[in-house]
Image (cartoon, rainbow, N blue to C red):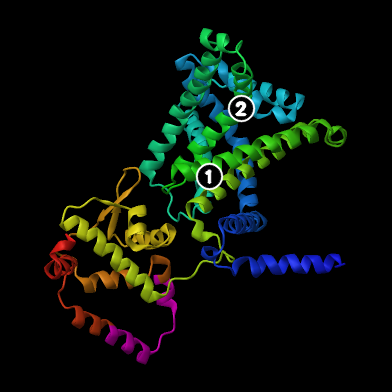
Amino acid sequence: MQSPAGIYSTIRGFLLNELWRPDLAQLSWIQQLAYKAVRFLFVLVREVSSGQLTLRAMSLVYTTLLSMVPLIAVSFSVLKAFGVHNQIEPLLYNLVAPLGEQGDEIVLNILGFVENMKVGVLGSVGMALLLYTVISLIQKVEVSFNYVWHAEAPRTLSRRFSDYLSVIMVGPVLVFAAMGLTASMMNSTVMLAVMHVEPFGSLLVLMSRLVPFLLITLAFTFVYMFVPNTRVRFGSALVGAIIGGVLWQGTGLAFAQFAAGSTKYAAIYSGFAILIMFMIWLYLSWLILLIGAQVAFYHQYPDRIRLTDKRIPLSGRFREQLALLVMYRIAHVFVYRGKPQTLEMLADHLRLPMDRVGEVVQLLQDRGLLVETASEPPEYLLGQDPATLGLAQLLASIRGPREEQTRLERQVASELPVDEVLSRMELAVNEALGAVTLRELVSREVEANPASV
């Protein structure tokens, strides 16, 4: 019989070696499913244990505590205009249900703070700070989701303003409209008549118990699709939402038992015990939401399920090649009036992960060579006329240092022979490319292969 140390060594060896060696295409479908499931669990545990998700969940707890009352106040004002503001209280009670009676006290205090907020007393400056606090919460959530989805660039200021306001103004209305529609359907005459007919009655009772889970799943799906500044497929968002919803319900039941037996904390922390329990539940809620987002990411990009999560650095030549390919593709679309390219379309065309193509696209945006539109998803257009953009100029712009790198370049103690080599390389590139423009480069392919248009 193996010792515990031997068992641990065997399991570790399997996870770090044997698990990744087989070619899944050579295995049966049952073996493929088993290997995929274990590999998925391995990378998911690795992401959680690395600490980044937990740190971001902790930071969101702090932001939530600052933004909760303003967010509810804004949502309350919007819902009041539609006459459904009275439904916000039952929703808050459901969200803190695992806290038991302590949760009821927290909801009463929050609603008391909201009722005491008066726009007339706040003034224009106070109202602006109120909206800024609410927007900062959504921005913090976006940063965390962008980390999960490896989205390098955040939303532009104009898109941030319009997208965030749509969430604040329209989101609560849609949520409570769905809740009201569900309640109306369950209380309709037809439904009441059907409930007296078996087995439909038992089935409807079961469905009514699943309604909270379904609403949470729909809410998670909406968040996963909308918040990250990248394209998220509905199927992947739904899978992540289902996993997140299951974790939410299961964690809620376990936390309710924990909260019920935590009377000793009240004896130690007195009045602060409620706040501590509330902060723990907020942390678990955000962590579950981020784990669901990680599940959605791996579902959309199964090729990222691998032994190591270290990003393969792009060599200088490969980065230049990708930048030229992206510019060539967008110029081709511009010249021959094709469909404007999104990041997902560029990644599909180049057969590369979207986040790696996004790095190059961001580089080209920083150099002013590409411009992002305000459409959803964003499309990318040329920042300069391809007929006047020379290839030598384009290559020099790609190779040029960024602003922070320029300062280091000025400080470096260079040597004259090295400077001469670099100058000769630049001169050779200019002589080789001559006055060829990006438009001419695109036209050459058409001349050689007219069917490519």
Q: Amino acid at mark 1?
A: Lys
Tell me which numbered mark, 2 or 1, is placed earlier along the sequence.
1
Relative depth, front residue between 197 and 320 = 197
Q: Quadrant of residue 34?
A: bottom right
Q: Amino acid at mark 2?
A: Leu
Q: Which residues are magenta?
A: 406-425
Instruction: Give the vertical position of 106 relative to 404 (above or below).
Output: above
- Residue 119 seen in the current view: no
Mark 1 — residue? 140
Q: Residues within 10 Å of mark 1 (few under 14, many from 20)?
A: some
Mark 2 — residue? 210
Seen as rendered, the residue at the extreme front is 28
Q: Position of residue 232 (x, y in %)?
A: 44, 46
Residue 120 appears left or right of 156: right
Q: Residues within 10 Å of mark 2 (few under 14, many from 20)?
A: few
Q: Position of residue 248 (x, y in %)?
A: 65, 37
In terms of secondary structure, what is the magenta stretch mainly? helix
Instruction: Give the vertical position of 36 relative to 85 (above or below).
Output: below
Identify the residue at image location x=59%, y=18%: 200
Identify the residue at image location x=49%, y=16%: 80
Quarter that holds the N terminus: bottom right
Answer whether residue 414 is magenta in the image: yes
* Numbered disc 2: secondary structure: helix
Relative depth, front residue between 449 and 384 = 449
